[in-house]
Image (cartoon, rainbow, N blue to C red):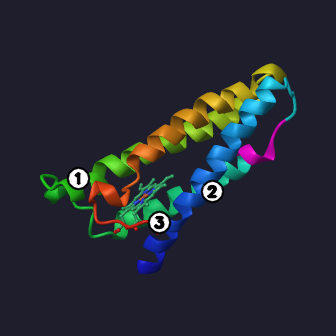
Amino acid sequence: MNILVHAHSGLRYVVLALLIAAIGSAYSKWQQNDGNDNKLYSFALISAHIQLLIGLILYVMSPKVDFSMMADKLYRFYTVEHSLMMIVALVLITVGRVRSRKAVAGLKHRTILFYYGMALILILISIPWPFRNLGAGWF
Ligand code: HEM
């Protein structure tokens, strides 16, 4: 359990770095009118899906997930807010990747920019950063 929490905690930086790299690359490829696909979009998707998988295991095992404790800010955060928002972000990333693959050359990178951008914002506001006092650290 402890190993899983640490893996989930550390992997956030991999997901964030790959998402930011994908968004930056999508912006420059869009500006250059590049019609080719970009593997970076898939790497970001894969890292986010690994995070989802660990998150789902934690959801079943974690003592911080408890529907009878919803009046408490910390339990409510992990039971509903964090998990739900992250799943929405994961759906956005997946839909964005599929749509970008199918899109005509001129729209590929703009599609990533939109979907991954929205997902990044959701992820950033749903992470239990230490300053939010939700019992989680930086790593
Ligand atoms: C990109 C997606 C995600 C990111 C970046 C992320 C990030 C984090 C971070 C930083 C923590 C705090 C870990 C610590 O205490 O040090 C955490 C905890 C947790 N996350 Fe996620 N998470 C994501 C997706 C999910 C999903 C989809 C679920 C469940 C469906 C989930 C369930 C949980 C649970 C249950 C905990 C509490 C674990 C515990 O301390 O007992 N996460 N997450």
Determine whether 17 is above or below 36 in the image.
Answer: below
Q: Residues within 10 Å of mark 1 (few under 14, many from 20)?
A: some
- The residue to which callout 1 is attached is 76
- State the residue lying farthest toward the bottom: 2
Say which element carries label 3. Answer: helix
Residue type at tag 2: Ser
State how far apart marks 2 and 1 are (Cα): 26 Å
Magenta: main secondary structure: helix
Tag in front: 3 or 2: 3
Q: Is residue 7 left or right of residue 72?
A: right
Residue type at tag 1: Arg
Q: Is residue 39 left or right of residue 123?
A: right
Q: Is residue 74 left or right of residue 17?
A: left
Most foreground residue, 50 or 120: 120
- The residue to which callout 3 is attached is 9
Q: Which residues are magenta?
A: 37-41
Disc with the residue nearer the chain's start (3 vs 2): 3
